[in-house]
Image: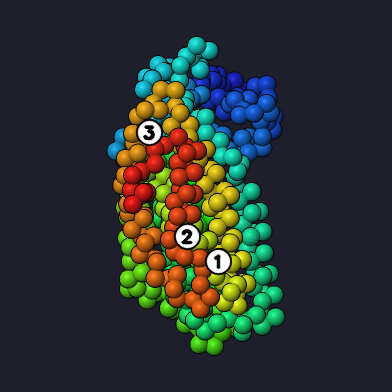
Amino acid sequence: MTTAQERSVPKVHFTDAEAGAKEFPDSNARRYNYFSAQKRRQTHYEDVTVEVQPDPRHYLSQGWIYGFADGSRGYPLTWTKLKAWGVDEPEPVRGVGTGGGGKDLVWPAHGWHEFRDPNEEWEMTLYRYGANVVRQVNQNIENAREAKAFEQWNPNWVAFVAAHVGAWMHVEHILGLYVFSHANRSGPTNMHNTAIAVNGMHKIRFAQDLALYNLTLTEEIDGFDGTAHLDAWNSDAVWQTTRRVVEGLTAIEDDWGESVFAANIVFEPLVGELFRSGLVQQCAAGNGDYITPTVVGAGEFDYARRDLRMSIALFEPRVSDREFADHNKEIMNGWLATWVPRCLEAARALQPLWSQPDFKPPRFEDSLDRAKNRFTGILSELGLDVPKELNQ
């Protein structure tokens, strides 16, 4: 009988790079202690979002595990001109056995990791919220179909919705797909990118709501021109300034901060809310239409109660940053100087729309003044100066 010779196999030696394969206390825990909770107790949102994509500038010690063709690694901090405290700190010296570098190690880029989305959005909450909104919008439209409510619309209002409410779907589509969804990977932490991606999904869903609503109206209303929004967006002089601004937002190069700031802090209150709340919501009912405000109102809620709230939480810490507050204020004031005049020009170009419905909304100047006051309030929350162009 032959006895098999015992083989000599190298023993496994764990280093920091294999930390994920090693069992340690709390290996099976469903709550994590590698980050500091914003409040006394960590939330489910923090457990599933905070540094799920790890950042060695903050906790890990083995360095980035991926990079880009130009040599940059992980989440490059150069993708915005804004700065957060600690970004100028040198990266820790790494090597086998260095671990976290000790409790007194000052990690770079620490300030970016303070951000938490006040809406606590992540994958599950996004699906639930979106499903609830679509369900409610569909129920409202179906109830209107059964009640023959579309027959009560004024003829001029039918043409207005076809051309101009339909045109707004292009704004939402472009912002969602080419501004927010484009910027979502560029943020400095996983928390930023998740919040920006959710913002993009809100826009894309609202654009889809408007597109499906357009198809429904084409079926329900005789003579409804389901393609009128294309002519309005492509050639109507009323929309061309807004179109230039929106397409200009997609052309911002290498600065996710400016993209989100210009869209949510400047464009939305001065143009978006002016059109949606200052015009459509104000005059729809008087023209026999109680359905369109429910569709448009869902998108308005996305911005006013969720996306703006997230944006203020994102930018305010940079304005009050313990190290770079002055730098960030200068950058943001520069963005205001660029985008406020453009958005005010786009807002004023929309003025002819206020005279088209039979039942008129409040005066355009009154609506624009409310939009300016709203914008001023947002800047006050951020601690930024009001641009002089707002008084013109």
Residue at 54%, 20% (x, y): give it.
14
CA–CA distance between discs 2 and 1? 10 Å
Disc marking residue 295: none
Image position of 10 with respect to 344: above or below: above
Identify which residue, 108 or 6, lies in the foreground. Answer: 108
Identify which residue, 243 or 201, lies in the foreground. Answer: 243
Between disc 2 and disc 1, whose residue precedes? 1
- Estimate the x, y position of residue 184 in percent, counting from the top left: 45, 46
Residue at 66%, 34% (x, y): give it.
43
- Estimate the x, y position of residue 255 in percent, counting from the top left: 35, 42
The residue labelled by disc 2 is 367
Image position of 245 with respect to 376: above or below: below
CA–CA distance between discs 2 and 3? 29 Å
The residue labelled by disc 3 is 329
User: Element under label 2?
Assistant: helix
Task: Please indicate, yes or no, whether residue 365 appears anywhere in the rendered image.
Answer: yes
Q: Closer to us: mark 3 or mark 1?
A: 1
